[in-house]
Image (spheres, rainbow, N blue to C red):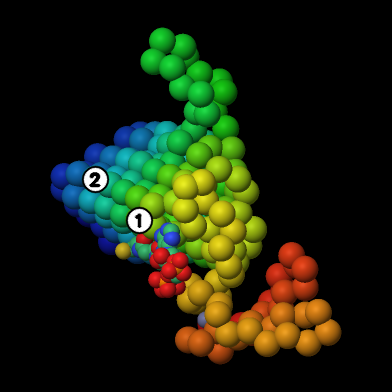
Amino acid sequence: MESKNFFVHESAYIDDNVKIGKGTKIWHFSHILSNTRIGENCIIGQNCMIGPDVKVGNRCKIQNNVSIYKGVTLEDEVFCGPSCVFTNVLTPRAFIERKAEFLPTLVKKGATIGANATVVCGHTIGRYALIGAGAVVTSDVPDYALYLGVPAKHSGWVCKCGVVLTRKTSSDGELHLTCSYCRSRYMLKGKEFTVIEEKI
Ligand SMILES: CC(C)(COP(=O)(O)OP(=O)(O)OC[C@H]1O[C@@H](n2cnc3c(N)ncnc32)[C@H](O)[C@@H]1OP(=O)(O)O)[C@@H](O)C(=O)NCCC(=O)NCCS
Ligand SMILES: [Zn+2]
């Protein structure tokens, strides 16, 4: 399917009542199920499955082999690394229907999910958070937090640009963090992470 607004590779399937924003590209063997909304300028890689009833924001990048099930919502500019896994049932059994028990997952604006990471359902991943490759998320993730490992633990903070914040200076109990890549500045007081100035 090709239109002047968006591109769908001929090997992809788009079900009924799907909305695709302008500039979005959907690549080989992907399947978008009914009542799904995909925003503008997204890239959906090869062998992805999205829906039914899923909302994907604008400018998201969904790499190869990602399934986004009902109950999962992606805000704008979310990056899903290759083969990362979402879930929507906490205690599945093949012989018990649990469609009424889906637990929602919300991935907020600008967050990144690393390759092969798993997001156990019922949690929110904060704005610009970064989930490392192979992590298993079993809790909510704060904005700008770096979560690594199995189960994923709070392992640091990341800049809006994605770079891990390692440059720190402290004064009066406040930790000042400066991004080595884009020079954005943040402040940490206890567990409170504040944006001072973003350059990106
Ligand atoms: C999390 C990440 C951003 C860290 O990068 P980094 O700052 O360069 O980190 P380093 O390689 O210096 O590692 C720092 C420490 O974290 C550990 N670490 C790094 N990535 C990890 C991960 N995904 N899970 C668990 N531990 C990890 C390292 O082993 C190291 O531990 P140590 O201090 O005990 O030696 C990166 O490793 C990552 O997972 N990026 C995601 C890549 C991805 O999935 N891309 C998808 C698109 S292709
Ligand atoms: Zn930065």
Q: CA distance from mark 1 to mark 2?
A: 15 Å
Q: Name the amino acid type tagged 1.
A: Ala
**Residue that label 2 marks:** 47
Residue depth check, mark 1 versus mark 2: number of the one nearer the observer: 1
In this rendering, position of residue 38 left or right of residue 166: left
Q: Nearer the viewer, residue 153 or 196?
A: 153
Q: Residue at x 69, y 83 (%)?
A: 176
Is residue 57 shown to the viewer in this render?
no
How many residues crowd around disc 2 within 10 Å: few (fewer than 14), some, or many (20 or more)? some
**Residue that label 1 marks:** 115
Q: Residue at x 50, y 39 (%)?
A: 120
**Disc count in the image?**
2
In this rendering, position of residue 92 left or right of residue 123: left
Q: Nearer the viewer, residue 98 or 4?
A: 98
Beta carbon at label 1 within 8 Å of ligand 1? yes
Q: Name the amino acid type tagged 2.
A: Asn
Say if 174 sits above or below 46 in the image.
Answer: below
Instruction: Give residue 196's quadrant in the image.
Output: bottom right
How far from the left and from the top, in percent, is residue 24?
34, 59
Q: Nearer the viewer, residue 77 or 97?
A: 97
Is residue 67 shown to the viewer in this render?
yes
